[in-house]
Image: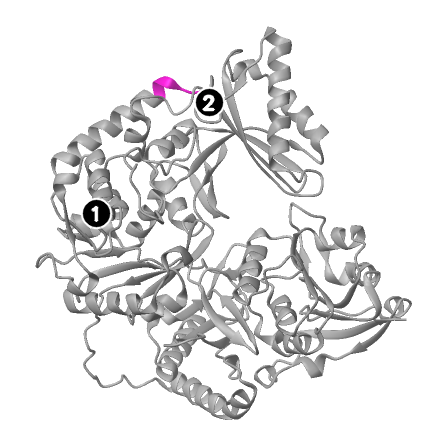
Amino acid sequence: MKFFVACAKGLEYLLADELQALGAGKATAALAGANAEGGMEAALRAVMFSRLASRVHWPLAEFACENEHDLYQGVHALDWPLHLDAEGTLAVDAHVSGPGLTHERYAAQRVKDAVVDRMRAAHGVRPSVDTESPDLRLSLVVRKGRAVLSVDLGGGPLHRRGWRQSQGEAPLKENLAAGMLLRGGWPKVYAEGGALLDPMCGSGTLLVEGALMAADEAPGLRRLAGAPPTRWKGFDAALWARIEAEARERAERGRAALRPVFFGADLDPKALQAAVANADRAGVAELIRLDRADITALKSPGPVRGLVVCNPPYDARLAADPALYRALGDALRAAVPDWRAVLLCGSDELARATGLRAGKRYAFFNGALECSLLVCDPVQPPAREPREPRPLGEGAQMVANRLRKNLRNSKGWRGREGVSCFRAYDADLPEYAAAVDVYEEDGGPARTFVHVQEYEAPSSIPEADTRRRFGELLDAVREVFAVPPAQVAIKTRARGKGGSKYGRMDQRGEFFVVSEGAARLQVNLFDYLDTGLFLDHRPLRLRIAREAGGKRFLNLFCYTGAASVQAAAGGAASTTSVDLSATYLEWAGRNLALNGATGRQHQLVQADAMAWLEADRGQYDLVFCDPPTFSNSARAADFDTQRDHVRLLRATMARLAPGGLLLFSNNYRRFRLDEAAVSAFAQVREISPDTIAPDFARNPRIHRCWELRAR
């Protein structure tokens, strides 16, 4: 059985790993959660033991749902007496998208109506609604014309552990605190005898969560206090009793061995009172030492190396102050320079204000607020002793020489045009087949990242030779750019059944901001095959910025919305960005928000672009269309650029306002535009050479582009 476990955004990869450790046969990260495979035991173990989950949804039914009638019928068809007593209570949480259902409270009401009508027909009595503690809590999700109705096995939010009643002005949810502790490697630090320190502890959430994690106390024990998580009639009470007994045994054993290695400080006496009260309710007050102290007075709690974990103030209500972050960084370097630190900062700017060198950064969401999580290990890296560089081999030296030549030759135009993200090498030496791209982080102290993507070698070349040459190329990259290994992203190809394919990507969740013209854009070099920014389209995007002033801009197959950001930066009257991927649209939304483009005039549309075009009735003055070569998504009709481009262009031109311009691009190397068919409804001119920047001059067929205007 497949089931879904929800979590805060930023915790997805950690949650997938946790679910597999809890017994799920397979778990894959999704947006704000993970899709898991396994039986009821795996799902109930997640309810009891997961530190990261916010909900566990066990599906009851999936059905086509285009409107409220379909919704009612699909829910009514279920045999509800199998799930709920006639006089029981229920609650419904709904999340809907699409044109047929737009109001979540109304959708939840229709689900309740269908359940009640079915129960009344069977028993003559009806269940009632209880939003606080229902016998059965249902979850409805409607997307792309499909509805999934599930039981909320936990009966409510799992982040509520049952010990926190006192909290500060901007409380941190317990599952996000657990994510911070796991990113910092707290279980390993504790097992090795380390301590936990929070120098701005507030109401003590991180310290209490850290203590209960060290004690191996399941989050569900105290939250449920011996009661079942749900009174759903399909609930396996005997199985739950075994899980609960295991949890109690583990907690008793862990608490008996728990060491008093938890230290906190805060300047606010009310926050410290709340921390004491929370620790007392959790049964760990005697293990946590709390002091009233300013960050500038921070002292090491002892000689043992440990983990600093901290959630300093950062939102508008708490008046985030870069000076406070500088003081925090200074204090940690002075007091615990050899400790590991995990800091949840409200923005990249505040993270940089600490002055700490982060080995890794992750995007974490505290509610709707995107934060930057720094992991520093150690807080103050030791000064490196100079050492003789290892001489490069002959092949690596050739690549290094070419890299230096390319950087030297491109320096002039990069400086004139303000280009900070560019291609430095593109298989210039055919036997060293890879692309090397450079990304300069925006803001100071800026970091340089290098993205190395291996090209597929001909099958006639032995795999050992391919590996050796790629290793030599990496040696040259490290020599020339001299950046830390954590700032080099490497995408390799692994041969397997069916030919060559890319190997597994990292799962770091590390985004950082780069600049392009007047725009600022988020990229992620590690988690995806592509980075979020197609560098070869830089000239096209900058043209869009120049021409978008006062215009209605449409971005089809928008990916992460970089072209929409450029249009907004250029003064577009409105932008509409269409893509089928929720992940890409969320990324596009962050990019737009990063540039202040957050009004209703900047729309994000999750849809199959072709179907949306043929149903839309809007008009646009400037359109950018960059379709994939092909798409066979289960959520949309198959798309092939060569086969379908005439239909796509005709539908797009139908939405173009008089005097408007369509920029059509694709990167299918064997693409042939059907000029005879297209010229029947548009004036066409190929502009490919004008859209190739100097750093892609060696690869002028990386994409082709045309201007289309209405006849």
Q: Find the distance from the CA under tag 1 to the CA under tag 2.
A: 35 Å
Q: Which residue is disc 2 drawn over? A: 134
Please identify the residue farthest to the top as the structure is shown: 124
Image side of residue 24 versus residue 415, left or right: left
Q: Can residue 258 be seen at all in this image of the molecule?
A: no
Are circles 1 and 2 on residues that touch, CB within 8 Å?
Answer: no
The mark that comes first in sequence, 1 or 2, is: 2
Residue at position x 33%, y 85% from top?
A: 392
Image side of residue 591 versus residue 51, left or right: right
Residue 373 in the image, given as x and y percentages of width and height: 35, 59
* Amino acid type of the residue that numbered disc 1 sits on in the rendered structure: Leu
The correct choice, above or below, for 616 with respect to 484 in the image is above
Q: Secondary structure at mark 2?
A: loop
The correct choice, above or below, for 415 with respect to 436 in the image is below
* Amino acid type of the residue that numbered disc 2 sits on in the rendered structure: Pro
Q: Which residue is disc 1 drawn over? A: 272
Q: From which residue to which does the magenta span run?
A: 235-239
Answer with the quarter of the image where residue 239 lies. top left
The correct choice, above or below, for 621 with respect to 159 in the image is below
Q: Is residue 686 magenta?
A: no
Residue at position x 37%, y 18% from top?
A: 237
